[in-house]
Amino acid sequence: MSHDHASDPKPTTHTRTGEQSLFHRREFDAPAALVQRAHTDPELFVRWMGPRGTTVSIAHFDAVTGGAFRYIVEAEKGRWAFRGSYHEVSPGQIVHTWEYEDEPGATLETLRFFDLPGGRSALEVLSTFTSREACDAMVASGMDGGMDTNFEQLDEVLREP
């Protein structure tokens, strides 16, 4: 699986890099430090995470090395909770687990934030699953479209003054 979303001016690429891993890359019109802050500041995080039309609430959000998070996405059709532990939070990198509370297993997410010329940045995410089957299920769920929507919403938040 590798594709760009051509209708998006800054497409996200999604690439299957192994039996148990996916690689995602997206560029933003904002410095890397600001994009990373949107991943570690709960007030910013709730504004771009989750499908459009949903509400994200934070149960716990301690985005530091050794910290943890839990957030809930609420929509008319249901409620979903996610949690994880931060293994590393440092300038330019976040490593954390990510779990959907209604399913077994966890994904190890490695996020790297890079500055690009012109005040732009790139975010690269490596998602490592516990099994090939878990990776296959995530691909089949349409997660790439969900990430695309989240990143479009993040673009909107980053454009605000």
Image (tube, grey):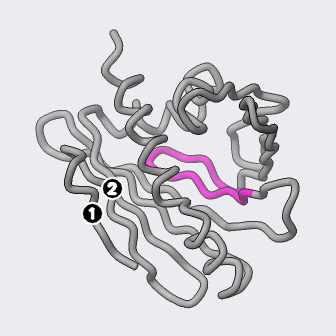
Q: Residues within 10 Å of mark 1 (few under 14, many from 20)?
A: some
Vertical position of residue 156 compared to residue 78: above or below: above
- The quarter of the picture where the C terminus appears is top left
The secondary structure type at the circle numbered 2 is loop
Q: Is residue 115 magenta?
A: no
Q: Residue furthest front?
A: 77
Label 2 belongs to which residue?
A: 12
Q: Taking 79 as reference, is 124 left or right?
A: left
Q: Give percent across and percent down for residue 18.
A: 50, 88
Q: CA distance from mark 2 to mark 1?
A: 6 Å
Q: Residues within 10 Å of mark 2 (few under 14, many from 20)?
A: many
Label 1 belongs to which residue?
A: 4
Q: Earlier in the sequence, mark 2 or mark 1?
A: 1
At label 2, which amino acid type do we have? Thr
State which region is magenta: 87-98
Q: Give percent across and percent down for residue 39.
A: 55, 37
At label 1, which amino acid type do we have? Asp
Image point (60%, 34%), residue name? 40
Q: Taking 117 as reference, is 65 left or right?
A: right
Image point (47%, 60%), residue name? 144
Instruction: Please give the label number shown on residue 22.
Output: none
Q: Give percent across and percent down for residue 23.
A: 44, 70
Q: CB of mark 2 within 8 Å of CB of mark 1?
A: yes
Q: Give percent across and percent down for residue 5.
A: 28, 57
- Principal secondary structure, stretch drawn in magenta: strand
